[in-house]
Amino acid sequence: MAENEIIADLSPVGILAHISPEDLETLKFHGTFGEYGVGEVIVRQGESQTCLYFIISGLLEVVISSGQNDVKLGEVGPGDCIGEVSVFEPGEASATVKVIETSVLWSLDVGSLQNYFEQLPVAGGQLMLGIAQLLTKRLRHANNTILANRILPQHLSVRSGQGKEPLKAENLAQPKGVLGGLFGKKSSSKFVPKIKK
């Protein structure tokens, strides 16, 4: 936790870029500002993570541990955020984030975010748009990394399930009478689409 509580301003950058200055002024009081010193861990891999952090100033490093090896994924600075996934699905952090330069962060938990939505639904939607754009950029970056390093699909459990061979259209065909997707239930009736002329 931050040693010193402070009040700062939120700027319309990053995930906050679509929010008006007036609505940012309201938003800042739904969260908490804090100053963090060099070496402090903001988020620890594997521990419960329920907050979104927006970086006002300073520099942090993102590290992922795999066995006994630590791999530095990168650095984040002013205008960046961490913990954005926890807004949609609170759970265990996928990486450790540590301060490498004294930093001021603004944090917001899911409950406070919901209160903001109730008070200013349009601005809340604009914040969600900013988070969605950030997640999309990070997904594209991950996909480019996968392509650049020629990582095979069977290494991606989200995409390939339990199969040992790469996904192909013919491997995804369902037997007749079976509804695919999450349901996995047999369908007793056949659906024939009607086309109006």
Image (cartoon, helix red, strand yellow):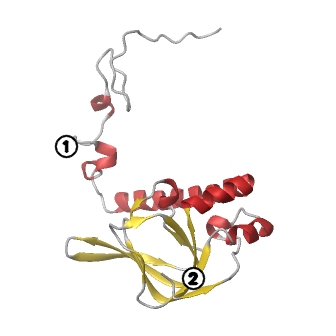
Looking at the picture, how far across and down is residue 119, in whole percent?
73, 56
The one of 24 and 60 positioned closer to us in this rendering: 24
Who is closer to the viewer here, 17 or 111? 111
Residue type, mark 1 in image:
Lys
Q: Secondary structure at mark 1?
A: loop
Q: Position of residue 142 (x, y in %)?
A: 41, 60
Q: Residue at x 35, y 58 (%)?
A: 146
Along the line of sight, the residue nearer the viewer: 1 or 76: 1
Q: Is residue 83 left or right of residue 69?
A: right
Q: Is residue 130 above or below residue 37?
A: above
Residue that badge 1 annotates: 164
Is residue 38 rendered to the left or right of residue 53? left
The residue that appears at 48% across and 66% down in the rendered structure is 83
Between the C-alphas of marks 2 and 1, the distance is: 47 Å
Residue located at (33% from left, 14% from top): 177
Placement of 171 over or under 108, stated as above or below: above
- Residue 78 vs residue 71: left or right? right
* Position in image of residue 108 (x %, y %): 58, 68
Q: Single out the residue that lies furthest toward the right.
A: 22
Mark 2 nearby-residue class (10 Å; few <14, some 14–19, many ≥20): some
Q: Earlier in the sequence, mark 2 or mark 1?
A: 2
Q: How many marks?
A: 2
Q: Which residue is mark 2?
A: 34
Q: Is 132 drawn above or below residue 36 in the view shown?
A: above
The three-letter code of the residue at mark 2 reads Gly
